[in-house]
Image (spheres, rainbow, N blue to C red):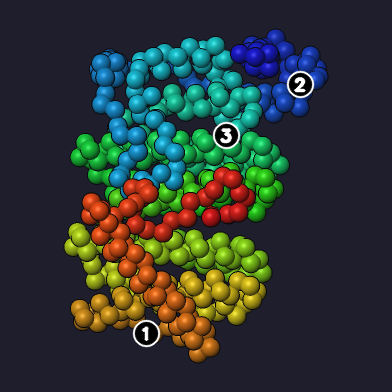
């Protein structure tokens, strides 16, 4: 421990045994009063847990579990689901954590014994960059080591991701942007841990539908909080928040893709809800050209991902018609909202609205044709002013020409010697705009 941690632990112990009061301790270290007082009061307000003697059966189960970990548990893949496209650098969480579970548990017990229970509890209020933050992370790892099955561990890891987002918000509110990078790093680690545990659960044959839905819901909330954090932080900190948003969106899509294999309707509903969140962002920031363009780009990316959910529905045969009807009805509504937005955003942002409406209309027309062929319910045509329709039609023609050119280019590439299509990465063919750490521009 460093000097401050020694002093905090000493003060906690002295006050608890009656050797000194809080004021005595603060008076003894006046230069540390501002940092020492809040942590000391938090630690003393928390009651220490009572001594509990585990039952013989619990001891036996714990011993068996520990021995299984010592003799080796199969390591999970570095990143669950083949859809991972390199947008978030994975952390070798499971492999590192499992290499010596007994050693991890022993190290944590020794560490907590050294700092004292009070210090460990006080650390729970710490933020990235604080002296006690490493202790907070250590106690979380201790909890993970003792949780039951893979589903429970995934839920626990997701709770850590929730904490990291709250920490980012707190850092922004306190004017500490310099500590955001660490919070973002730990957020990515926690979310990776969550998805890895879910993949292990799937490999063991456990039902993962509920926990993947939890991940999708949580990451959607994270995205909204990160919007607020983005608005609070200075330009030099925006790259970190953009990376966090990238992590959040990647996790959301991974979770929804997995959920769609069991419940396509719920996955589609959740994706549509996220899209509406982006439209709300547009309406809230209609005077800001850059923010309107950013939110529209996110909306379009989510719409493209919705096509993946529809594809999964077709491949699995799960509620195909219901999913397509649901998306068609929502799309008709979204087009009307975008038409309303068009007249209220600055002129510089109108081309972005036109492009998104054109993309949406192309998908919508295709979907409506399918529904008509199936004899399914078709939603009423969206009500869009004629002058906006004309601009959107022009954009649609531009998009169709571009698609034809791309298709021709792909055919030419397929005809190159060797008969292979040139690819730069193994990324699935979908539009997702990776956030660049070299710029403060959001979502590009």
Q: Which residue is mark 3?
A: 182
SS assignment at label 3: helix
Q: Which residue is mark 2?
A: 32
In the image shown, does 42 or 312 lie closer to the viewer? 312
Q: Nearer the viewer, mark 3 or mark 2?
A: 3
Q: Position of residue 27 (x, y in %)?
A: 80, 17
Whole-number angstrom distance, CA of label 1 to CA of label 2: 67 Å
Q: Which residue is mark 1?
A: 380
Q: Is residue 404 above or below residue 318?
A: below
* Residue at image point 47% right, 82% down: 394
Q: Is residue 224 visible?
A: no
Quarter-of-image position of residue 124: top right
* Residue at image point 57% right, 65% down: 293
Q: Is residue 221 above or below residue 237?
A: below
Q: Nearer the viewer, mark 1 or mark 2?
A: 1
Instruction: From the viewer's perspective, tell me whether residue 31 is left or right of residue 179.
Output: right
Whole-number angstrom distance, CA of label 1 to CA of label 3: 49 Å
Whole-number angstrom distance, CA of label 3 to CA of label 2: 24 Å
Q: Position of residue 378 (x, y in %)?
A: 30, 81
- Of the 4 image quadrants, the one containing the N terminus is top right
Q: Position of residue 111 (x, y in %)?
A: 51, 14
Label 2: few (<14), some (14–19) or many (≥20) C-alpha neighbours in 10 Å:
some
State the mark number for residue 112. Answer: none
SS assignment at label 2: helix
Earlier-in-chain disc, 1 versus 2:
2
Label 1: few (<14), some (14–19) or many (≥20) C-alpha neighbours in 10 Å:
few
* Residue at image point 32% right, 53% down: 422
């Amino acid at each position: 421990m460093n000097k401050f941690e020694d002093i905090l632990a000493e003060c906690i112990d002295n006050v608890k045994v009656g050797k000194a009061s809080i004021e005595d301790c603060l008076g003894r270290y006046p230069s540390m009063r501002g940092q020492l007082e809040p942590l000391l009061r938090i630690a003393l307000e928390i009651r220490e847990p009572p001594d509990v003697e585990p039952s013989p059966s619990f001891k036996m189960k714990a011993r068996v579990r520990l021995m299984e970990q010592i003799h080796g548990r199969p390591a999970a893949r570095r990143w669950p689901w083949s859809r991972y496209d390199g947008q978030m650098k994975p952390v070798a969480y499971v492999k590192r954590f499992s290499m010596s579970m007994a050693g991890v548990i022993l190290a944590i017990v020794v560490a907590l014994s050294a700092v004292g229970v009070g210090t460990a509890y006080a650390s729970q209020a710490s933020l990235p960059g604080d002296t006690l933050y490493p202790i907070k992370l250590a106690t979380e790892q201790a909890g993970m080591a003792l949780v039951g099955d893979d589903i429970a561990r995934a839920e626990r890891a997701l709770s850590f991701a929730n904490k990291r987002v709250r920490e980012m918000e707190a850092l922004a509110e306190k004017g500490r942007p310099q500590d955001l990078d660490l919070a973002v790093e730990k957020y990515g680690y926690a979310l990776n841990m969550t998805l890895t545990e879910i993949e292990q659960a799937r490999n063991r044959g456990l039902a993962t539908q509920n926990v993947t839905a939890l991940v999708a819901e949580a990451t959607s909330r994270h995205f909204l909080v990160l919007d607020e954090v983005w608005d609070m932080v200075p330009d030099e900190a925006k790259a970190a928040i953009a990376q966090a948003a990238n992590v959040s969106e990647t996790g959301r899509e991974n979770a929804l893709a997995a959920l769609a294999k069991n419940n396509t309707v719920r996955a589609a509903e959740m994706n549509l809800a996220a899209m509406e969140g982006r439209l709300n962002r547009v309406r809230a920031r209609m005077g800001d050209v850059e923010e309107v363009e950013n939110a529209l780009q996110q909306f379009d990316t989510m719409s493209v991902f919705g096509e993946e959910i529809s594809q999964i529905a077709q491949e699995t045969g799960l509620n195909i018609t219901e999913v397509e009807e649901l998306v068609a009805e929502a799309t008709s509504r979204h087009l009307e909202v975008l038409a309303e937005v068009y007249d209220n955003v600055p002129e510089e942002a109108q081309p972005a609205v036109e492009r998104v409406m054109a993309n949406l209309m192309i998908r919508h027309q295709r979907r409506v044709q399918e529904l008509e062929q199936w004899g399914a319910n078709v939603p009423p045509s969206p009500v869009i002013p004629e002058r906006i329709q004309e601009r959107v039609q022009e954009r649609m023609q531009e998009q169709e020409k571009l698609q034809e050119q791309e298709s021709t280019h792909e055919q030419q590439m397929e005809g190159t010697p060797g008969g292979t299509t040139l690819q730069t990465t193994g990324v699935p063919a979908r539009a997702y705009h990776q956030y660049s750490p070299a710029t403060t521009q959001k979502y590009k």
